[in-house]
């Protein structure tokens, strides 16, 4: 069974003449342990797709199933609980709480789940150490570089041991080197730690780290490619040109 | 909870300046409430200690409901009542002593400023209480004359011993008393006692045949038997007597209570304003942290967690603010107690003790402070919980509200203002007070609709000022697109300035009236003033002989006096003042509000008629022309009210003026407590001063003062009080500065992108800075405009409210209005400094990228 399954997923913003269809009957499936990149030109609906899968937003039509459970039937509290336990998020702007330290930020999801703070911090510290931030645990976000902040965010996404990580342009706000670091970190997350990652990006070089790429245009899936590792970036770039980015 | 507390604490300590400033708002409110509620009870305690010096092992105390004297024969009615083991009658009066009377040394602070003169029946007194007289002294005997028993501590203070003589003021001049016995040092609080035989104290106070207290010991210790005996005593004596605790000076308590209520209202207003500021700050906080909150929601924080986190922040601020407020309030209270110790002593002869703090007050202040904070945090916390995870991810565009809420809130606001105005016309004290609150509320509700025209008007002014830079238009547009928020901010300014203007109005009117009445009622050349002005009950007067001797002095044209007796009407204590209808109008005067002056004085001379003051009419609910039944020592007497008038000293006490002849007949009092004297035309003060002072030396209970000097002293004292009040007000206005700063800061944060755009299309930093300053000035102008409006109304309400007892005309507080305008605009400019710099410093590219 697929970890994620979408059924005719449709999202329309606005109403009447101003209505914009962001997603138009999208059906995709993502298997456990897979690293999937979602690509497409601006406004193709890729972020919307990610938000719907993460239960951050609700579709106008269709459904998302995570481990076979339909999100549409959940209320706000149930969705919140699902996010807390099953899904980790990584955002473009890191979104760390400025007044909390690195380890406190990373521990947030489990702290919110009621785990004892000392235990939550221990788990967060483990992840941060794995990501090479063992000596920066007590630093506040403004004392960290962009790449370091994003690593804290990835640790935060993993601390509750979720099955699924959703990353929305995780490298969009980073320089090339830090971007590569984060992308390979996400790849490690699938290969080394067995999680599933869905990442939205418009950077072919970053998408090349994924196992599979889903191309979206005007709210519809237009293509899917399984990548071979060599020359993947060029392959993706030409594909993007093809669909008119 | 733990997590929420950590988060709250970090956020609060992360923005120290803002946290301090907003917490200050809470601190201030709690400070005022706590501080003032310390001061007044402390005054009351001091007052009680003075009045209730008598103690002892007595089960039941009987006094007259008026607090005054009554015939000694009344005690006979107690004979034969079962359950009584003994009783003793006494006549007890506080004798206020002039400064340095006892120690004779102006450099040393007086240890004894008043004594209780206790006249008792030696036999009966000893049956109730053991008097441990040091050998070789003895206790009093019934046939003693000019003999006294005092405590060792009083003897020390006086520097006298057994067999020596002390002299005390009395109605017939100084009276010498020989000390026949000395009691152990006094340990109880309150005045030292001078024990004399009953007849001696009756002579010294001019209350022949009268007593004012009966002390009774009961045989049984069983509760029900005691209650039965107490009931039997009450029914034997009738309703004119109070069986139970001593309760003198109830009129004084009433006026202290009034003061307390006024200051509590001030404190509540301060807290109310604090609430606005907290509300505003948390709105800013939620706007600023939209992304943080959205992210927390995305990570799995429930709505309740978010609400909880914000509420916790409010709670932490509320608790800290209230605690600090209580500590500062205590210091403030202690300071005021110290500061007022001197005037309290010289005007009322009350010794203030150390500040009184009740646990209930601590709890109430804490609850109010924390409660208001939590309440103000509630709405922002709820709106924070409605932030969706999506808010963390998408660019936040500043919202535009433009809605014209002409609907329900505007209409109800107008209706509230209408009702408030009707209340004012009604002349009913309660309705007027309610109207004041309604008016403020109505103004805040109706304000969003009025905002656009006002902002437009001021915008034109600014446009003219900033000549064609388009800034004024933009500022005006920015301000009017969110009328709701702007109104909330402006409301904080509004309340602050309203209070300044209102109190300005009250002060101007009150000072004008004081000045007027002072000159009218105390305009005589010489005044003979007792130690305790207006609480006549504790003053020892002088026999008519004193006034007569003054009248014989060469160059004196006329002498008039006031005499006092305590009376009661329907259980309400009434000050009954006796005046001579012929001489009084020549020397002094009353300020008449109803009834003809000449006719009223004539009516006093012709029968049982009385002139009463406003407090009398308001408290008893009667009007001119009514006949009331006055409880006197001789029984009930009917008096007809012929006019309403007031003199300054008695204005706030329930007072009736009758003729001195009636006072002697019905109350048995002939001693003068206040004497006024006029000189013949052309006679200078210096010519008669020596003679007058020589006569007055026999009556040290009076301070001799030239009328003009007394008025000057009073006005100076009043002005000092007003100065302190205004200082407090300026304090109160500071929190509104914080509120304005917050609103401007939100505006800047929310419009980062817009500002970047304005910069990108060619606005200079200076122009951006001006834009924010222009907004601030507009905001301040709106707040000031409403504030002055509300203040004028409230001031009028206060004057009208006081006018029920204390007739005065409303005077336009020009100084207050000008001060409010200056403060308002100054604050507007000050509040803009930080946000304006923040806006100007934005990097164009970053601002445009800002999401």
Image (cartoon, rainbow, N blue to C red):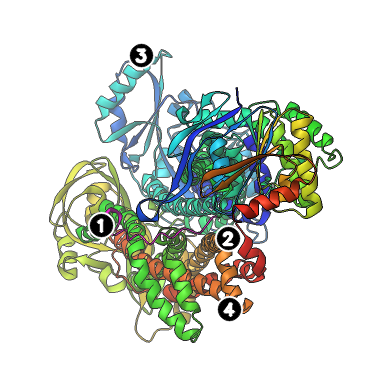
Quick check: can you spot residue A144? no
Q: CA distance from mark 2 to mark 3?
A: 77 Å
**B747 with respect to B540 (left or right):** right
Discs 2 and 1 share one subunit: yes
Chain assignment, label 3: B
Q: Secondary structure at mark 2?
A: helix
Picture layout, residue B316 above or below residue B607: above
- Find residue B354 and report its image quarter: top right
Question: For residue B850: magenta?
Answer: no
Discs 2 and 3 share one subunit: yes
Q: In x, y percent, where is residue B597?
A: 19, 69
Chain assignment, label 4: B
Mark closest to the chain's N terminus, 2 or 1: 1
Q: Which residue is mark 1?
A: B411
Q: Which residue is mark 4?
A: B767
Mark closest to the chain's N terminus, 3 or 1: 3
Mark closest to the chain's N terminus, 4 or 2: 2
* Crowd class of label 2 (few under 14; some 14 to 19; many from 20; radius 10 Å): some
Q: What residue span does the magenta drawing correspond to?
A: B396-411
In the image, B251 versus B848, the foreground residue is B848
Disc nearest the viewer among 2 and 1: 2
């Amino acid at each position: 069974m697929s970890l994620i399954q979408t059924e005719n997923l449709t999202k329309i913003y606005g109403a009447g003449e101003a209505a914009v269809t962001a997603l138009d009957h999208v059906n995709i499936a993502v298997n456990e342990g897979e690293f999937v990149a979602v690509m497409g030109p601006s406004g193709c609906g890729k972020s919307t797709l990610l938000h719907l899968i993460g239960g951050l937003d609700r579709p106008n039509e269709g459904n998302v199933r995570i481990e076979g459970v339909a999100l549409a039937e959940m209320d706000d509290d149930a969705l919140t609980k699902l996010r807390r336990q099953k899904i980790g998020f990584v955002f473009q702007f890191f979104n760390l709480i400025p007044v909390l330290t690195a380890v406190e930020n990373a521990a947030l999801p489990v702290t919110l789940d009621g785990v004892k703070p000392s235990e939550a911090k221990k788990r967060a510290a483990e992840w941060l150490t794995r990501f090479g931030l063992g000596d920066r645990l007590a630093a506040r976000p403004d004392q960290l570089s962009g790449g370091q902040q994003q690593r804290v965010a990835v640790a935060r996404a993993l601390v509750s041991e979720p099955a699924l990580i959703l990353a929305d342009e995780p490298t969009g706000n980073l320089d090339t080197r830090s971007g590569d670091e984060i992308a390979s970190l996400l790849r490690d997350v699938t290969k080394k730690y067995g999680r599933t990652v869905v990442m939205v990006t418009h950077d072919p070089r970053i998408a090349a780290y994924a196992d599979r790429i889903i191309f979206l245009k005007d709210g519809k899936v237009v293509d899917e490619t399984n990548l071979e590792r060599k020359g993947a970036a060029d392959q993706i770039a030409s594909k993007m040109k093809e669909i008119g980015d | 909870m733990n997590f929420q507390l950590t988060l709250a604490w970090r956020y609060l300590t992360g923005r120290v300046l803002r946290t301090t400033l907003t917490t200050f708002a809470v601190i201030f409110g709690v400070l005022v409430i706590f501080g003032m509620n310390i001061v007044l009870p402390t005054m009351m305690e001091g007052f009680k200690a003075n009045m209730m010096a008598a103690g002892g092992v007595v089960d039941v105390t009987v006094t007259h409901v008026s607090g005054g004297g009554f015939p000694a024969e009344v005690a006979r009615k107690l004979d034969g009542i079962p359950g009584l083991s003994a009783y003793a009658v006494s006549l007890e009066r506080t004798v206020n002593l002039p400064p340095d009377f006892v120690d004779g040394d102006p450099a040393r602070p007086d240890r004894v400023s008043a004594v209780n003169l206790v006249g008792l029946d030696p036999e009966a007194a000893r049956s109730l209480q053991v008097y441990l007289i040091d050998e070789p002294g003895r206790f009093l005997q019934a046939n003693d004359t000019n003999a006294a028993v005092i405590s060792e501590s009083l003897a020390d203070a006086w520097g006298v011993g057994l067999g020596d003589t002390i002299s005390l003021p009395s109605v017939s001049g100084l009276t010498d008393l020989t000390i026949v016995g000395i009691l152990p040092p006094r340990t109880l609080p309150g005045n030292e006692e001078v024990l004399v035989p009953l007849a001696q104290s009756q002579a010294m106070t001019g209350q022949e045949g009268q007593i004012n207290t009966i002390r009774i010991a009961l045989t049984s210790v069983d509760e029900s038997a005691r209650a039965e005996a107490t009931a039997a005593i009450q029914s034997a004596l009738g309703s004119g007597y109070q069986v139970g605790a001593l309760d003198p000076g109830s009129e004084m308590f009433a006026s202290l209570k009034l003061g307390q209520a006024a200051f509590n209202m001030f404190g509540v207003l301060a807290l109310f304003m604090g609430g606005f500021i907290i509300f505003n700050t948390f709105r800013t906080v939620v706007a600023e942290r939209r992304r943080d909150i959205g992210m927390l929601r995305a990570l799995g924080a429930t709505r309740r967690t978010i609400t909880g986190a914000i509420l916790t922040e409010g709670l932490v601020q509320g608790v800290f603010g209230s605690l600090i407020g209580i500590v500062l309030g205590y210091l403030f209270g202690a300071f005021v107690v110290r500061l007022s110790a001197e005037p309290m002593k010289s005007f009322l002869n009350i010794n203030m003790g150390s500040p009184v703090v009740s646990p209930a007050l601590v709890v109430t202040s804490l609850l109010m402070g924390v409660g208001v904070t939590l309440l103000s945090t509630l709405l922002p916390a709820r709106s924070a919980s409605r932030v969706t995870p999506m808010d963390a991810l998408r660019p936040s565009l500043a919202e535009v509200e433009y809605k014209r809420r002409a609907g329900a809130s505007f209409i109800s606001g107008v209706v509230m203002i209408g009702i408030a105005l009707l209340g004012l016309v009604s002349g009913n004290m309660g309705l007027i007070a309610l109207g004041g609150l309604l008016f403020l509320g109505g103004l805040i509700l109706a304000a969003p609709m009025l905002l656009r025209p006002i902002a437009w008007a001021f915008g034109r002014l600014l446009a003219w000022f900033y000549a064609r830079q388009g800034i004024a238009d933009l500022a005006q547009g920015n301000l009017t697109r969110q009328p709701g928020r702007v109104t909330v901010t402006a409301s904080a300014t509004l309340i602050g300035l309203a209070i300044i203007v209102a109190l300005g109005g009250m002060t101007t009117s009150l000072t004008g009236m004081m000045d007027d009445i002072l000159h009218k009622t105390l305009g005589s050349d010489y005044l003979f003033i007792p130690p305790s002005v207006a609480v006549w009950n504790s003053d020892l007067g002088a026999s008519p002989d004193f006034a007569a001797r003054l009248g014989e002095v060469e160059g004196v044209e006329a002498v008039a006096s006031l005499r006092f007796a305590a009376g009661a009407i329907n259980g309400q204590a009434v000050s009954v003042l006796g005046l001579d209808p012929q001489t009084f109008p020549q020397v002094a005067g009353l300020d008449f509000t109803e009834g003809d002056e000449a006719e009223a004085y004539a009516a006093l001379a012709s029968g049982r008629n009385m002139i009463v003051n406003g407090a009398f009419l308001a408290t008893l609910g009667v009007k001119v022309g009514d006949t009331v039944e006055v409880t006197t020592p001789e029984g009930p007497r009917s008096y007809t009210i012929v006019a309403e008038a007031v003199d300054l000293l008695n204005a706030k006490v329930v007072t009736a003026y009758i003729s001195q002849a009636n006072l002697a007949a019905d109350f048995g009092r002939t001693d003068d407590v206040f004497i006024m004297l006029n000189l013949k035309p052309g006679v200078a003060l210096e010519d008669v001063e020596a003679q007058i002072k020589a006569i007055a030396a026999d009556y040290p209970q009076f301070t001799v003062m030239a009328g003009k000097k007394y008025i000057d002293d009073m006005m100076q004292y009043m002005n000092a009080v007003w100065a302190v009040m205004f200082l407090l007000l300026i304090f109160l206005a500071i929190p509104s500065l914080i509120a304005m700063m917050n609103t401007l800061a939100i505006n800047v944060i929310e419009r980062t992108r817009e500002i970047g755009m304005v910069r990108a299309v060619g606005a200079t930093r200076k122009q951006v800075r001006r834009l924010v300053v222009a907004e601030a000035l507009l905001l301040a102008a709106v707040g000031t405009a409403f504030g002055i409006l509300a203040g004028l109304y409230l001031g009028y309400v206060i004057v009208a409210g006081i006018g029920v007892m204390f007739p005065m005309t409303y005077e336009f507080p020009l100084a207050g209005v000008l001060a409010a305008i200056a403060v308002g605009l100054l604050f507007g400019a000050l509040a803009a400094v930080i946000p304006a710099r923040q806006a100007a410093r934005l990097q164009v590219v970053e601002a445009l990228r800002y999401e």
